[in-house]
Every structure is written in C-alpha cells, then in structure tokens.
Image (cartoon, helix red, strand yellow):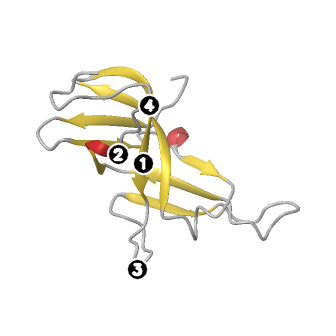
Amino acid sequence: MPGIETTSTYDKEKQEFVINSPTITSIKFWPGDMSKFSNHAVVYAKLILDGKPFGVHAFLVQTRDLVTYEPMAGIEMGDIGPKLGYNSKDNGFMLFKNVRIPKSNMLKRYAEVDTEGKL
C-alpha cells in the first residue's frame, strides 16, 4: 500500500481519534531526541471516517507521561541504535497501538471533523 499507512480513526461515541501503526512499514522514524527526550509529536496519519479514508491529516499526540517520562499507553518507542558518524544523536522509532487522543488534537488549519464525524 503506497503512502502513509498510519491511521487515525474517529470514534464518534467518545469524540476521540484512535491512532494506529498497522504495519511494520508504518512505524515512524526520525532524528532528534525522540527515543529519550520528546514528550509530544505531530503525527501525520490517514484520516478514517465511518470506515472510509479522507487523506492525510496532522494530529498532536502526547507521547510520554509528563511526570514519569514513561511512554503513554499504546506507544512503543526507542533508539534505533548505533549511527555512522553522529552516534551521540538520539535517533528513534515510534509506533502506535490504539492510542486515543481528544478530538481537539487534530490540527485544523485546512480541515476539521465535526462531532458527527463529518469532514
């Protein structure tokens, strides 16, 4: 399946989005303090409304507890290991398993989902 595989499915009943990394190729990788230090991320995911895809949208996701710094429920993350030339940098991976975020965490510059799940 080409394109972004991470999904964000709207749950009308709970007024939340459910973020998922359904495949190994949907795992997020990036340089810059993700595996040890970051506590929030802007995640781009395919929006799913009533079982139908509606393109890629951005969502603000809290990735760690702000007190314990442990990953939030449903989030797996870590360092990708030794790097050539710049091994001191914390390059990491992150995947999502049914991570629930509030409806208000959808970034809404270009589109917004109403309470009934309409774009």
Task: Name the N-terminal-most of marks 2 and 3.
Answer: 3
| Mark 3 neighbour density, 10 Å: few (under 14) some (14–19) many (20 or more) | few
| Label at residue 105 | 2
Closer to the camera in the image, 118 or 110: 110
Task: Name the N-terminal-most of marks 1 and 4.
Answer: 1
| Label at residue 7 | none
**Badge 4 vs badge 3, beta-carbon distance below 8 Å:** no
Under circle 1, the secondary element is: strand
**Badge 2 vs badge 1, beta-carbon distance below 8 Å:** yes
**Badge 4 vs badge 2, beta-carbon distance below 8 Å:** no
| Label at residue 109 | 4
| Mark 1 neighbour density, 10 Å: few (under 14) some (14–19) many (20 or more) | some
| Mark 4 neighbour density, 10 Å: few (under 14) some (14–19) many (20 or more) | few
Task: Name the N-terminal-most of marks 1 and 3.
Answer: 1
Closer to the camera in the image, 44 or 111: 111
Q: Is residue 64 above or below residue 61?
A: below
Under circle 3, the secondary element is: loop
* In this view, the mark in front (2 or 3): 2
Q: Name the amino acid type tagged 2.
A: Asn
As measured in the structure, the alpha-carbon distance from the residue carrying label 4 to the one carrying label 2 is: 12 Å
Q: Name the amino acid type tagged 3.
A: Thr
x%, y% of residue 90? 68, 66
Q: Name the amino acid type tagged 1.
A: Leu
| Label at residue 60 | 1
* In this view, the mark in front (1 or 3): 1
Identify residue for label 3: 68
As measured in the structure, the alpha-carbon distance from the residue carrying label 2 to the one carrying label 3 is: 22 Å
